[in-house]
Amino acid sequence: MARSPQPINAFPVFMRVAGRAVVIVGEGDEALAKARLMGETSAALKVIAQRPSAELAAWAAGAGVDILPLPYEPFLIEGAALAFAATGNEDLDRRISDDARRLGVPVNAVDRPECCDFFTPALVNRAPVVVAVGTEGAAPVLAQMIRARIDRMLSPALGPLAILAASLRAAVENLLPKGAVRRAFWSEFFAGAPARAMEVGHADEARAAAAELLARRGVYGGHVSLVGAGPGAEDLITLRAQRLLLQADVIVHDALVPDAVVALGRRDAERIAVGKRKGCHSKTQSEINDLLVSLARDGRKVVRLKSGDPLVFGRAGEEMQALRDAGVSYEIVPGVTAALAAAADFELPLTLRGVSSSLVFTTGHDLKGEALPDWARLAISGATVAVYMGRSVAADVAARLVAAGLSPDTAVAVVENASLPGRRLLHGTLADLPSLAGRDDLGGPVTTIIGDAVAGADFRRSAPLASGARPLPEPARRLEGAGA
Ligand code: SAH
């Protein structure tokens, strides 16, 4: 473990303040900041302010904190657990600090380290779990940055989970032998079913899950999380996905998930690429299903990482079925699907008042048969259509839609590598779409969006899809005039 060569000058401790007097002297922003911080505690907070600012008065009224409209006198801080000098007046703050030290009250004077007995940390508050970050006053902005990073790593439900843990401590000590078995129980408690139930606010379910874990005495099953990795950019992943990646023993990922996203997992987690990209050697879906089941049966925490959202063209249906059949516990974590990322890159409204009020996600691969699929009818009645995996069928999609009555002038937006640094934006019309299949320069994943709402996009950064209108392919001409 890395250790600073510098000795610690301000030692962090957790001080009991429940019900004790904490006094803040000051009227303005500095006092308000300290009041907000101490307002997160159960201390008996007192604010000494003759002329509190409107914000301070409003905060105090909302938080039920008394403001004493008195001039500062030493007796006001006598016996307090903590005192804050936050008047903004250097001489007065120094006087308060001197008085506090004489009275044996620990004191903090805002922005005057030499007058401070203690520093206030940046807090990650999941009470009773609290992470305090301090820099001995050297770099408050850094402390806030560290705080924000830790905050993202910790589930919002950690507080209630810790309270539940406290209520189970005695039972666990009675039932489970000290050492490895007990430790295994608590790891499973904080990362397994009880944590998942608490995460969605089901405290009763969490307690029942904990009871079940207790009964299993150290032998726990695995778990599979089907997690959406988002469209590619690593900061478009959800906080929950990131947390699960940090807990996973194994990450099973598709080829479309960039390394940078997989790398959000623990360094010692096993990583298994299962391909699923055109032309790559990859496992079959049933091999993937079997793999997930067997990893979970070995008791491992598995993250099945899929590009975009796992429930959109992700074959999650089959994986969920296999997990259910095998009795393996699993959960789904949504992600930003490609169509949404593509639309964002294009600044393209997917629904547009008075133009388009529905949105279709399709692959276009169902257009081969005789019958017109429902989505094509929706497109004709004004829906915006997002076509996934649509490159090879671009000509068919265009031809069938035009044959069915959609205008060849309907706007089309094509995004390759949405959200990623190498993204490309192309625009055109339905008449241009057939050229997509022949674009060998597009090596990344491509999403096509069709519809009148697309005309509302920002075309300043996009290139034309085709130079000049191309003739429509054979079937369209044949079917032309057939109508919708
Ligand atoms: N579950 C994924 C879709 C998987 S199917 C999701 O919700 O996004 C794979 C198809 O998704 C690709 O053929 C392409 O059409 C689309 N896709 C995935 N990532 C993309 C990206 N970054 N840019 C554009 N399209 C993408």
Image: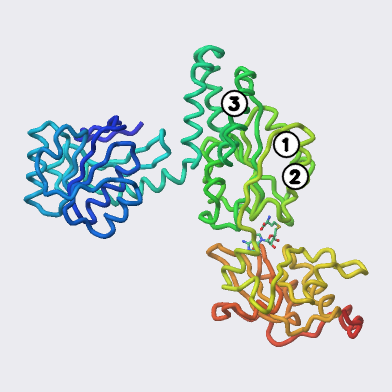
Q: Nearer the viewer, residue 298 or 134?
A: 134
The structure's colour scheme is: rainbow
Residue 110 visible in this rendered orientation of the protein: no
Q: Going 72% across and 52% down the picture, which residue do you hit?
A: 314
Q: Which residue is mark 3?
A: 210
Q: How many marks?
A: 3
Q: Which residue is mark 2?
A: 283
Contact (CB < 8 A) between labels 1 and 2?
Answer: yes
What's the residue type where badge 2 is placed? Answer: Lys
Q: Nearer the viewer, residue 153 or 473?
A: 153
Residue 480, picture quadrant: bottom right
Give the mark nearest the N terminus, 3 or 2. Answer: 3
What's the residue type where badge 3 is placed? Answer: Ala
Residue 4 visible in this rendered orientation of the protein: yes
Residue 76 vs residue 379: left or right?
A: left
Give coordinates of residue 92: x percent, y percent: 8, 49
Give coordinates of residue 135: x percent, y percent: 25, 42
CA gap between label 3 and label 1 equals: 27 Å
Contact (CB < 8 A) between labels 3 and 1?
Answer: no
Q: Residues within 10 Å of mark 2 (few under 14, many from 20)?
A: some
Give the mark nearest the N terminus, 1 or 2. Answer: 2
> Closer to the camera: disc 3 or disc 2?
3
Q: Which residue is mark 1?
A: 291
Q: Going 11% across and 49% down the picture, which residue do you hit?
A: 71
Q: Is residue 265 above or below residue 89?
A: above
Q: Is residue 327 above or below residue 358?
A: above
Q: Quadrant of ligand 1?
A: bottom right
- Secondary structure beneath dot 2 equals loop
CA gap between label 3 and label 2 equals: 36 Å
> Closer to the camera: disc 3 or disc 1?
3
